[in-house]
Image: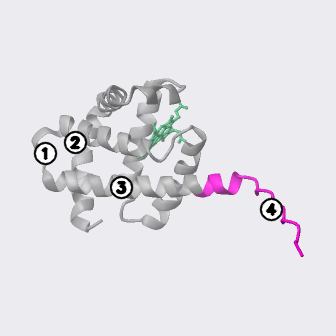
Amino acid sequence: MTPEQITLVRSSFARVVPVARSTAALFYANLFEAQPALRALFKGDMDKQGALLLQMIGAAVGLLDKPQTLLPVLRQLGARHGGYGVRPAHYDAVGTALLQTLAQGLGPHFDTATRAAWTTMYTLVATTMIDAAEQAAATLTPPQPAPVAAPATA
Ligand code: HEM
């Protein structure tokens, strides 16, 4: 991300912080309206879940200029998401709901450059999480038995 994009993400996120709770609720309403099947993955209290999500986005926004700190946090988060039943395809739905929610919440402040900056950030976050979940899954998969060699024929 360019320094300008980091500034745009930070300044727009600062407008969301005072209304974090309603933003989180709107985000899940948007997500479950578009993808009702995803509701079943969430087992806990959605108010708490929303607070955790916004906290984590806030932490990522704060660390955008410190990838050496941010990337390991995202990788661990991504590996945990594999355990929640989250699959790579779900990240598109979440990204769409996030951008939709920001557009609704920020109105005219969510201009083309701000949208592009958030899209870049979400892509970075999602690809890092997906990659880590895939690696974690690969590590957990037991080695497959070696194929039985066909008997040598004369
Ligand atoms: C930007 C990407 C995402 C961020 C920052 C994020 C953040 C979080 C955080 C902070 C938690 C709390 C638990 C933990 O830290 O391990 C969590 C849990 C969870 N997230 Fe995400 N998440 C993201 C993407 C997704 C996606 C794509 C899905 C798919 C629907 C998803 C579904 C879940 C579920 C099912 C839980 C567990 C909830 C429960 O136990 O009730 N998340 N997420």
| Residue with the most extreme front position | 154
Which quadrant of the view contains residue 95? top left
As measured in the structure, the alpha-carbon distance from the residue carrying label 2 to the one carrying label 4 is: 57 Å
Region of the chain picked out in magenta, as a range: 135-154
Q: Determine whether the beta carbon of the residue marked 3 sits less than 8 angstroms from the nearest atom of ligand 1.
A: no
The local secondary structure at tag 4 comes to loop
Q: Are marks 1 and 4 in contact (CB under 8 Å)?
A: no
Q: Which amino acid type is shown beneath numbered disc 1?
A: His
The answer to which of marks 3 and 1 sits earlier in the sequence is 1
Categorize mark 1 by other alpha carbons within 10 Å: few (<14), some (14-19), many (20+).
some
* Mark seen at residue 15: 2
142 with respect to 91 (left or right): right
Tags 1 and 2 touching, CB below 8 Å: yes
Residue 146 - label: 4
Residue furthest toward the left?
108
Could you tell me which secondary element the residue under label 3 belongs to?
A: helix
Helix, strand or loop at mark 1: helix
Give the image quarter of residue 67: bottom left
**In terms of depth relative to the viewer, which is nearer, 96 or 89?**
89
| Residue occupying image coordinates x 36% and y 60% | 64
Q: Amino acid at mark 4?
A: Ala
Q: CA distance from mark 3 to mark 1?
A: 21 Å
Residue 123 pos. (x, y %): 36, 55
Is 77 covered by the magenta stretch? no
